[in-house]
Each structure stands twice: as structure tokens, then as C-alpha cells.
Image (cartoon, rainbow, N blue to C red):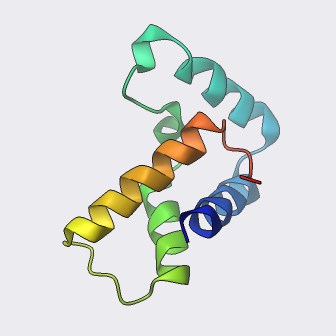
Amino acid sequence: MNKKIVNKFIDLIREDLPQTIINIINAKNKTQSYYMLCASHEYIDTNMYLLEAIRTYDPTIKIESKQFEQRFNECFEIARNNQFNKVK
């Protein structure tokens, strides 16, 4: 399910951000200044995009649950590590 969530998340982001901004985000994320951070938050509230993506595939998940926290963190890390490109 995480692959579907990540791809939906990326689709949502790419609807609002042009490739030039995604390239800037990816470049910043490779620097020491963004170790353990993500530059995407400078441009949009990616947390809300990921929440929407998770809710698309798991509408009953409770935000305050450990399951949600784990899924959220895993999906965000996959997207960031994949430079906000869809997962195959």
C-alpha cells in the first residue's frame, strides 16, 4: 500500500509545483543543511498532501495512531529518497 500512497503523494505535489521547484528541493535536500529535513516545506505544506494521499487508500486510519505515524514517515522518506519521482 505504501507504493500507492507515495505515488498519490507525488502526483499531488506535482500538480502544484513545477519541475524547476522540485529540482531546487532535491538539490537542497542533498546538502548538509537539510540533513534530516526536507526543503519541500519551504514551498508547500507537504504534510497535508501526504495526509490526503494516506486517507485516499486508508480512510479509517487514526492520525494519532502509531500505525499512521509509521506509514507517514515511511512514505515521506520513500518520496524524498526517490527525489519526488513516482515509485515503480
| Closer to the camera in the image, 66 or 9 | 66
Q: Quadrant of the C terminus?
A: bottom right
Instruction: Let me know if residue 45 appears in the view.
Output: no
Measured from the top left, where is residue 5 in percent x and y?
A: 58, 67
Instruction: Let me know if residue 28 appears in the view.
Output: yes
Q: Is residue 9 above or below residue 25?
A: below
The quarter of the displayed image where residue 70 is located: bottom left
Q: Is residue 88 above or below residue 43?
A: below
Measured from the top left, where is residue 82 in percent x and y?
A: 65, 39
Measured from the top left, where is residue 87 in percent x and y?
A: 71, 52
**Residue lying at 54% horizontally and 81% vertically, measured from the top left:** 57
The quarter of the displayed image where residue 2 is located: bottom right
**Residue lying at 19% horizontally and 72% vertically, measured from the top left:** 64
- Extreme residue in the top direction: 32
Q: Is residue 13 above or below residue 24?
A: below
Q: Quadrant of the N terminus?
A: bottom right
| Closer to the camera in the image, 79 or 40 | 79
The quarter of the displayed image where residue 33 is located: top left
Measured from the top left, where is residue 17 in percent x and y?
A: 71, 47
Count of numbered labels shown in the rendering: 0
- Extreme residue in the bottom direction: 60
**Residue lying at 65% horizontally and 55% vertically, measured from the top left:** 13
| Closer to the camera in the image, 41 or 55 | 55
**Residue lying at 44% horizontally and 9% vertically, measured from the top left:** 32
